[in-house]
Each structure stands twice: as C-alpha cells, then as structure tokens.
Image (cartoon, rainbow, N blue to C red):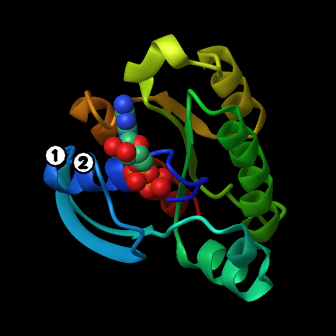
C-alpha cells in the first residue's frame, strides 16, 4: 500500500481484512497475512501498510526494499486531496522504473481514488484518475473505504487477478 498520509491506506487494508471501518488508525508499520477464496481458489495475501514519510522514501535502501518486496502495488490517493493524486503519479513512475524490465510483463499496479463518499469535497475528477491509469497501464477504482466494502474487495481481488495473469505469462 503506497500513497501520502491520510489517504486511507490503513482504512482500505483494515476494511479488506475485517470488513470494518473503524475510523482511526495508528501510524504503525504492519505486514498483514490474510487468506481468502477468490473464484474458488485460495489466495494468500501479504499486505505491507507503511506510514508515508518523505525522508524515508528519499532514502534509497528503504525505497528499494519497499518496491522489491511486493508482487503488486495499490497506490492510493484521496479524491479530496490533489497533492496526494500528484504523489501517486510520481509513485507509478518510481515503481515502473524500479520493477519493470524490457520485454517482461509489467508489474501489476492498481490506482485507487479513495473517499468517494466525500464527493462534495472532490478536487480530483474520476476522469483524471482513469486517464492516469490508462496512460500508465494500471487498473483504476474509485472507492470509499468508509461506505463501500464491495469496492474495496474489487481493489484487492482485481490486483490478485493481475498478479496471477502476470505469473502465468512469465
Ligand atoms: P493512511 O495514513 O493513508 O493510512 O490513512 P488512514 O487509513 O489512517 O485514514 C486517514 C483518515 O481518513 C482517517 O480519519 C480515516 O477515518 C479517514 N478515511 C479513510 N478512508 C475514508 C473514506 O473512504 N471516507 C472517509 N470519509 N474518510 C476516510
């Protein structure tokens, strides 16, 4: 899970793991394990939810560790926070530069515009999110961790599908 602070990375993770939205989440770095059945097959998820820190991200060893660890990425912004959207645009480039090799299947990335329930405070349009995903070969969902469990499920199941496809193509 990558993205700036307060965009809902922990809320999305906890919603997926427990079905609940609890409102406040600590700034604790956590790696969660969770087994779910998707389309009749058991999938083991390991989700790394880390607090965002610019200093940490500019440290190359931390960057390297984060980007090499995962089979796929959920890049989260808030539809009410343009700076968080700009940060996701940079994160896509960072992940692609670190992970993608010429001729190989691209690393699965899902871009998520969260806090859809706060549409009256929206500053990033759905089209902007969709266009970013289209031009960077990512999946895109707009969701509300607070109000729509089904949307959150689609994010993680969609990523699992892409990882499976990438593996079978390798
Ligand atoms: P993180 O720093 O990216 O992990 O963000 P958090 O998951 O800690 O969420 C930051 C704040 O946004 C918390 O107060 C959450 O309750 C709130 N939040 C997260 N997702 C949503 C959402 O979908 N809708 C609304 N209204 N608030 C949300």
Percent x, y for residue 158? 41, 42
Q: Is residue 117 left or right of residue 170?
A: left
* Residue visible at 28% across and 40% down in the picture: 153
Residue wearing tag 1? 20
Q: Is residue 14 left or right of residue 26?
A: left
Task: Indicate which quadrant contains ligand 1.
Answer: top left
* Residue visible at 43% across and 30% down in the picture: 115
Disc 1: CA contacts within 10 A as few (<14), some (14-19) or many (>=20):
some
Q: Is mark 1 within 8 Å of ligand 1?
A: no
Q: Secondary structure at mark 1?
A: loop
Q: Quadrant of residue 137?
A: top right
Residue wearing tag 2? 15
Badge 2 or badge 1: first in the primary sequence: 2
Q: Quadrant of residue 138?
A: top right
- Dividing the image into 4 quarters, which one contains the C terminus? bottom right
Percent x, y for residue 25? 32, 59
Q: Is residue 92 above or below residue 50?
A: above
Alpha carbon distance from label 2 to label 1: 5 Å
């Amino acid at each position: 899970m990558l993205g700036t602070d307060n965009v809902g990375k922990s809320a999305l993770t906890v919603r997926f793991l427990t079905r609940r939205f609890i409102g406040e989440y600590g700034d604790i770095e956590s790696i969660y394990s969770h087994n779910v059945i998707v389309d009749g097959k058991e999938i083991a998820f390991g989700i790394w939810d880390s607090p965002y820190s610019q200093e940490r991200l500019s440290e190359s060893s931390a960057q390297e560790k984060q980007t090499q660890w995962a089979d796929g990425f959920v890049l989260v912004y808030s539809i009410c926070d343009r700076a968080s959207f700009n940060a996701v645009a940079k994160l896509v480039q960072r992940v692609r530069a670190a992970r993608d090799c010429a001729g190989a299947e691209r690393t699965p990335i899902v871009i998520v515009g969260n806090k859809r329930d706060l549409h009256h405070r929206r500053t990033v349009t759905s089209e902007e999110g969709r266009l970013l995903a289209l031009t960077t070969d990512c999946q895109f969902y707009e969701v509300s961790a607070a109000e729509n469990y089904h949307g959150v499920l689609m994010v993680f199941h969609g990523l699992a599908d892409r990882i499976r496809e990438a593996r079978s193509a390798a």
